[in-house]
Image (cartoon, grey):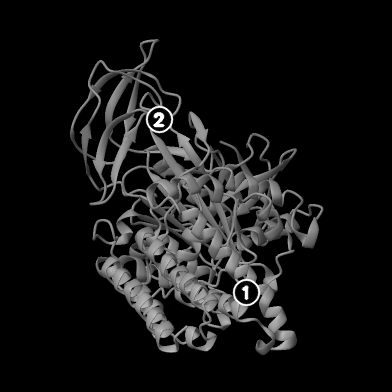
Amino acid sequence: MSKGTIKKVAGPLVIAEGMRDASMFDIVRVSDQRLIGEIIEIHGDEASIQVYEETSGLGPGEPVESIGVPMSVELGPGLMGNIYDGIQRPLNTILEQTGNNLKRGVEVPSLDRERRWHFVPTAQPGEVVEAGDIIGTVQETEIVLHKIMVPYGMKGTVHSINEGEYTVEEMVATIKDENGAVNEIGLMQKWPVRVGRPYKEKKAPAMPLITGQRVIDTLFPIAKGGVAAVPGPFGSGKTVVQHQLAKWAEADIVVYIGCGERGNEMTDVLNEFPELKDPKTGESLMKRTVLIANTSDMPVAAREASIYTGITIAEYFRDMGYSVALMADSTSRWAEALREMSGRLEEMPGEEGYPAYLGSRLAQFYERAGYVVSLGKEGREGALSVIGAVSPPGGDLSEPVAQATLRIVKVFWSLDANLAYRRHFPAVNWLTSYSLYTDTTSKWFNSKINSDWTDLRVRLMRLLQDEAELEEIVRLVGMDAVSAADRLKLEAARSIREDFLHQDAFHEADTYTPLEKQYLMIKLVLSYYDAAVTALDKGADIERLVDLPVRERIGRYKYISMDQSKDEYDNIQIELSNQIQEMLQKEDY
């Protein structure tokens, strides 16, 4: 434990002298107020400390004490449903102790030390176990079964293990190693946030993460264990997309990091999530969610920590064999915190003032995602999918954070302000977005949903691309110069945009669309197009084809509940066929 004194204070950066015995990334307590900070640079006996709390009022000569351990998170029962700040302090507990305004230097344990959990052993005395093996379980919430794992670096024979009610600090089992030493295991373990949790093997992601958002699942899917970026200018709906994914993505656990975004947005999350029902269990969504609130009015340095805190918690649940979805909103604010600290450290700036190591830090974060085989004899498989929002100033995707992110991620959902202004949500631009998981997930879609899923997706994309080309012609020479066949393409593409891609987040039936219903919706739009093309070849009038009454019913199909969707689909197909036949007979083609 190293002790020193403050030499200089520059915003969230404190330089302390007399810290020769301290190590990089050690946690320190600054001044008599015991503000929490982390050593990020050492020169001789001088340590540069980023302080995660407000530093106003600090001055030279005040004491600085190194705790001697790197910044770590507490992992154990009690994480679910909790709301933490960027350094894993529980905000609800702080509220009870200090009131609405956060006081400086508050020391609160991350996990409740008083609450008792019922531990049920799954291992027996005499059983040989290794790191990652599950020795017992705790029913943390109605939805989440918390699995107690042997900590990393521990191996041996179970010496004793007992069922009962325990706090997170009490020991539930002992393990005797090959040297005869007895190690104790509790419900809680600690892990340094800047170090990725180890695993046995990382596999190529091949199964899609179903989100219920049609533009994502059908056109630009993300795989379980994949990484995606949601860039877009102010007001294009990044946060709404993140909220929708947190609510509906097919994940066992959700970790939502509000990193540097407006406090009111985080308030919406805190108000909404407890009210939302988990579609699979009917329980509150908060019972499988961990929230990290580090808003723009909180100390800037803590933004950097919040990203690592969140992903370490997510890795912990991944190691239990769960599918975890992590939302980071937004990585741009995190990068701004890096830039501020880099400037105060007087480092040589890179592009637009960001530090030269911006790209490598982003890569270190996103590379912790993946579909992995966990440690332990069981070989459990878990997935950690990371979806990061990027908020480029003025929507300029050529700026460093967006470009560095694009080099790393495999899915790019490009949000378009023009679509948002036209009230088209989600405002994902289908011409500039892409997914590199399309080929790997197409086998799953074709085998689980329908063998022609990929073919239909290709047809949708082709019609949307044709529409973009035809719109250029229409702007130049007007609609009258377009052939009837091309006019029909424009109408089909409009139907894809308005009836399929547009989705109402606040409508009970439309906010989430199962894959089976998505398939039927695509079939309806393309059935109309194919039937109209056939009728056009027989000489039907384009104006009458465009104004077919059944099109209104196709447009309303997305508001039909899943229970009625198959019957309604069959009825629309019959009506479409009848109306086409009736029109051809009436005109005597």
Q: Tell which of 180 and 379 is nearer to you.
A: 379
Query: Is residue 384 at all visible to an observer of this figure?
Result: yes
- Give the label, 1 or 2, closer to the camera: 1
Label 1 environment density (alpha carbons within 10 Å; few <14, some 14–19, many ≥20) = many
Q: Tell which of 358 and 583 is nearer to you.
A: 583
Q: Residue 507: x, y in percent?
A: 35, 76
Question: From this viewpoint, which residue is outermost toward the left?
Answer: 164
Q: Residue 211: x, y in percent?
A: 42, 59
Checking the image for residue 329, the label placed there is none
Mark 1: amino acid? Glu
Q: Tell which of 184 and 205 is nearer to you.
A: 205
Label 2 environment density (alpha carbons within 10 Å; few <14, some 14–19, many ≥20) = some
Mark 2: amino acid? Pro
Compute the Cα span from label 1 to label 2: 57 Å
Q: Is residue 516 left or right of residue 192?
A: left
Q: Residue 17: x, y in percent?
A: 70, 45
Q: Earlier in the sequence, mark 1 or mark 2?
A: 2
Residue behind mark 1? 467
Question: From this viewpoint, which residue is outermost toward the front?
Answer: 588
Q: Is residue 69 left or right of residue 127?
A: right
Above or below, 105 relative to 564: above
Name which residue lies at 62% across and 77% down. Answer: 486
Above or below, 310 relative to 392: above
Please state the total of marks drawn on the protein image. Answer: 2
Residue behind mark 2? 151
